[in-house]
Image (tube, helix red, strand yellow):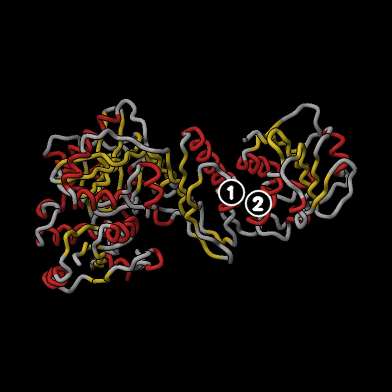
Amino acid sequence: MKSIIVVDVLSTGYNYIEDIVRRGYAPVSLESKVLRHSIECGIDSPINPDRLFHQPVMLKEQDTYEKTLEEVRKYDPVLVVPGTESGVVLATKLAADLGLPGNPVEYIKAMTEKPAMHEALKDAGLRYLRGKTVSTPEDAVAFCRENGFECAVVKPVRGAASQGLFLCDDLDEVRKAVSTLMNMTNDFGDKISEVLVQERIIGTEYVVNILSRNGFHKLTTFLKYNKVKTSEGGYIYDNTKYIGQLEPGHTELIEYAFKVADAIHYQNGMIHGEFMVDEKGPILIEVNCRAMGGSLPAAFADLISGQHETDSILDALLYPQKFMNELKKPYRLLRNGCSKSVIVSHDMEVEDSPVFEVAKHLRSTYLIDVAQVTNPVMLSKTRDLESSGGEIYLVNDDKAVLDEDLEILTNVETSFFQFIFNDGMSRRMVPKRSGKEKSPKEIMESVGCCGAVLVASDEELEIEGAQCITKDTMSEAHKGFDFVIVNYMESLLGLKERECLKLLFDTFDLARQGGRVIVPKSSYDYMSYGRRGVEQLMIVKGLTVEFIPGYESEMVIGTNDRI
């Protein structure tokens, strides 16, 4: 059987294996020396067979390129493609020497090294970033002064996923960033000896993913990055949103991206390009000549655009006529989608991941790719894409709903992080009772409860005019209540945060459409973040937080307005 070689099966490159099998070829995983070195340095992990339904043939790059070429030739390949950034150079060379669809080896630097990319743009008469490769902080500062840069970007010459990227607001930050990088290794496991200093463009950052065959280019997906700057000057992903409807200026950016592909002499495969747009128009940040990374789930991408990048790459390279037939089709998305990266603000020990309970109640949640924490573990502060706390993928036909869910997730992460990852300390303190707490019966009377009323409490109660349950007898109550009074207190203390949130959400869910959920102070004092936390949880569940004049103070009231 003929094969398809994937050099470095990592990240989104995992999707190649099943895509190859579906087309009737044998998948072969070739681990490059670059990846092997980064694995040995602890930068990357070996291929994880648990992520694959079919297992590929496993090869390693030999001690010489000639031996590797001969080993690969034995598998009668029809294609050689890079699975991730570390595999681009080797895949390009092998494809060229085997006479397979690929890209000209003589332009490999322009495709993989940031300084050469921008030199290629300069030679082509395109807008480019002014920059210089330096080896000392003093050289970096001198370059900035010579060019009148008050701020700058400092990053490794080669890299991906914003690793080692610093946005510097002044020359002192430039000096510090260069010094920091010179004591680091890059994302391929090599000690950094040179760094790139570039002018900094302030604008909006976009992703343009381009599929190419024989020098013809097609837009596959168009996305917008939202990143945030860390206190150390790093640049980390917050969320990435797919753009379905082009707005003024977008076509200019896409045309520029196609010209970038021509300038670096890219012919076959996928370009993942990152661009900035300011008042002067679009400008390249960098390109990566492989499928978009981030371990993007294939089924998620399929829902949004009807294709995923590794699937489209194989079709373009194997069936060029099909690619040409589809070249003139307009850009369309099937649904709205985005991914939210979990940002961990500091190194911390956590014992629980209640984010699963939060995210599953949002209408747009497709996949929660976050560690299932059941025993105490250490989480590192998020410094780049690789050190994020995970990804939450959202899909919805209604853009307004997707935007609302993304805003909720962002607010929970920013202001209520114990609802994302919990350290076990947020509900350890037993509130001091005032002795003036109202009983559930008194709450019912003060609010004017009538009709179907539920009281959820720590212990079994008998209250005229209400059905009463505990967390252990919840199955006896069925949705359809006009009023739900949440009166849990001490029983919350023995639960992990995820269990606590499940109990609260299940209780909220018993209110009928138009029904009200009431949480008194005597109860919310036992919950993480108190009153504000309960209000946020109501919003997650789709309840409308109310302020009703005349009602008893120090109560949280939510109305179930969701159909």
Mark 2 belongs to which amino acid?
A: Leu
Residue at the image position 39 percent from the left and 56 percent from the top: 386
Among the two numbered marks 2 and 1 on one chain, the one whose residue lies closer to the N terminus: 1
Amino acid type at image mark 1: Val
Q: Is residue 107 visible?
A: yes
Q: How many marks?
A: 2
Q: Residues within 10 Å of mark 1 (few under 14, many from 20)?
A: many
- Tell me if 479 is positioned left or right of 224 in this view: right
Which quadrant does the C terminus fall into?
A: top right
Give the x, y percent position of residue 299: 39, 50
Residue 141 can be seen, yes or no: no
For disc 2, the marked residue is: 501
Residue 500 percent coordinates (x, y) = 68, 54
Q: In which quarter of the view is residue 118 placed?
A: top left
Residue located 20% across and 52% down the image: 112
The disc at residue 358 is 1
Q: Secondary structure at mark 1?
A: helix
Residue situated in front as seen by the camera: 325 or 68: 325
